[in-house]
Image (tube, helix red, strand yellow):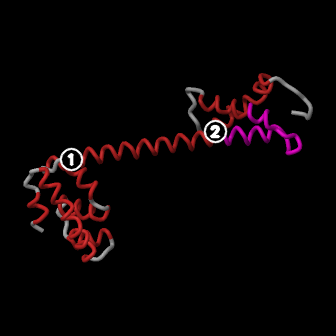
Amino acid sequence: MAEGEIKSFNDILTEYENMIYYLIMKLGIRDSEKEFYQEGMIALWEAVESYNAKRGKFSSYAYFRIEKAMLSLIRKRNRQKENEQAYISQVKAQQGNTAAFLEEGLDPYLHARIAQVLTDKQMKWFTSFVLEDLSLRTISEQEQVTIDAVKNWARNAKPKIQPLLRDDGSSKKKRVNRR
């Protein structure tokens, strides 16, 4: 676009539409819903609005802006997919934990109350030692701490758990104390 030349956006779009399609093909995008085409048109319009003739050719600037917009949309979609997958994994893990707790006989609501009163390290001890029946040595190796540190987590966790177990009225108190 020559300096001082004013064209309607439809004329500009007609001229640069092939560039949008080229970038869609170059990036290997399947655009059945024309979302990337629309993103390219918006980027072209923004390029027209913000173009400074002193900085170079319009075609180079338009190419850069359209490609950048499409790459940003690809990154955004990838982040959304990763977040959705993480959420699904988290929900499945929680459902799996609930099923495991029910199989073990531990009420998931009791587990949630226990998790509220324990620190992260104490909860690691509770989950590993009480629920998964791992040895103190195994826990210390997994967490890369000394056995005494794990014993300390247990020593501090037991007084916090016992009132919850008494309130629950269950016999699970014996499981915590027997070790």
**Secondary structure under badge 1?**
helix
Q: Main secondary structure of the magenta part?
A: helix
Question: Which residues are the magenta region?
Answer: 45-69
Q: Tag 1: Cα neighbours inside 10 Å, few (<14), some, or many (≥20)?
A: some
- Residue highlighted by disc 2: 70
Q: Is residue 55 magenta?
A: yes
User: Can you tell which mark lies on residue 44?
Assistant: none
Decide: is 138 above or below 167. Answer: below
Residue 111 is left or right of residue 68, and the answer is left
Q: Secondary structure at mark 2?
A: helix
Answer above or below: position of 46 versus 162. above
Q: How many marks?
A: 2
**Point 79% across, 33% down: residue:** 49
Q: Amino acid at mark 2?
A: Met
Please rate how many residues cluster around mark 2, counting C-alpha atoms within 10 Å: few if below 14, some from 14 to 19, many from 20: many
**Residue located 13% across and 50% down the image:** 168
- Residue 170 on image: x %, y %: 9, 52
Task: Tell me the quarter of the image containing the N terminus.
Answer: top right
Q: In the rendered image, which quarter is residue 155 located in?
A: bottom left
* For marks 2 and 1 on the same chain, the one whose residue lies earlier in the sequence: 2
> Does 105 sit above or below residue 12?
below
- Please tell me which residue is depicted at 14% across the width and 48% down the height of the picture: 103
Question: Amino acid under label 1?
Answer: Pro
Query: Which residue in the protein does label 1 denote?
Result: 108
Looking at the rendered image, the disc whose residue lies closer to the viewer, 2 or 1, is: 1
Vertical placement of residue 12 versus 55, above or below = above
Q: Quadrant of residue 74?
A: top right
Q: Residue at x 89, y 44 (%)?
A: 54
Q: Quadrant of the C terminus?
A: bottom left
Residue 45: % across, % down: 74, 31
* 147 inside magenta stretch: no
